[in-house]
Image (tube, helix red, strand yellow):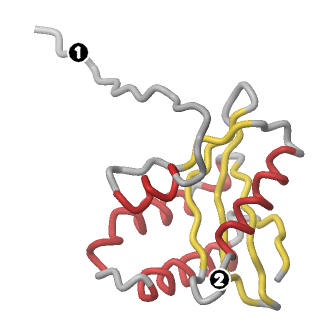
Amino acid sequence: LETTPLNISEPSVAYRICRLCETWRVEKGREDGEFETERLAIERCLSFAAHFQFQAVGAMMGESLVGFTINEVVHDGYYMSHFGKCDSRFRGISDLLESETARFMRDLGCTRMNNQQDLGLGGLRRYKQSWRPDAFLKKFCISRRSII
């Protein structure tokens, strides 16, 4: 297993990420509709990747992509971890990939991570809390006030 930076604006890399997402969905026993919103968000991220400075890290087993994270340096030493998926047939790969991603992002000057929006998904929330975070960022909803 080797971790390496990924250029997600390359079509072949984007294709491999989408294939891995489908593998993940099947392994987790998720119906296609359950993953639809996240799948669309990942595809949108990949389609606009050339316009942003995403930092992606992949876990490779030979020529096969078996895990990835997509991240973005935001401000004040923070990075936002937008997406991550791993082939669950490889035990421990998720923790390894998160650790390697953190090292990679540290080299870019990041010291803190905001790990994905949990979107009310209990499993993701429990996973994030299992890391014993030392702080939480405040969450805001911004909307335009209608002028009448």
User: For the point 67% across and 45% down, which residue is it?
Assistant: 72
User: For the point 75% across and 64% down, which residue is it?
Assistant: 57
Can you say whether 57 is above or below 117 in the image? below
Which residue is outermost to the left?
Answer: 148
Q: Residues within 10 Å of mark 2 (few under 14, many from 20)?
A: few
Horizontal and vertical percent position of residue 43:
49, 66
How many numbered dots are placed on residues in this image?
2
Q: Which residue is mark 2?
A: 91
Which residue is outermost to the top?
Answer: 148
Q: Quadrant of residue 132?
A: top right
Left or right relative to 26: residue 102: right
Q: Secondary structure at mark 1?
A: loop
User: For the point 59% across and 41% down, which residue is it?
Assistant: 133
Of 147 and 106, which appears nearest the observer? 106
Of 82 and 99, which appears nearest the observer? 99
The quarter of the picture where the C terminus appears is top left
> Marks 1 and 2: which is nearer the front?
2
Q: Which residue is mark 1?
A: 145
- Residue type (three-letter) at the residue carrying disc 2: Arg
Horizontal and vertical percent position of residue 47:
55, 62
Horizontal and vertical percent position of residue 76:
72, 25
**What is the spatial separation of the Cα atoms under label 1 and label 2, in whole angstroms?**
49 Å
Q: Residues within 10 Å of mark 1 (few under 14, many from 20)?
A: few
Q: Earlier in the sequence, mark 1 or mark 2?
A: 2
Q: Secondary structure at mark 2?
A: loop
Of 131 and 23, which appears nearest the observer? 131
Can you say whether 139 is above or below 19 in the image? above
Q: Quadrant of residue 123?
A: bottom left
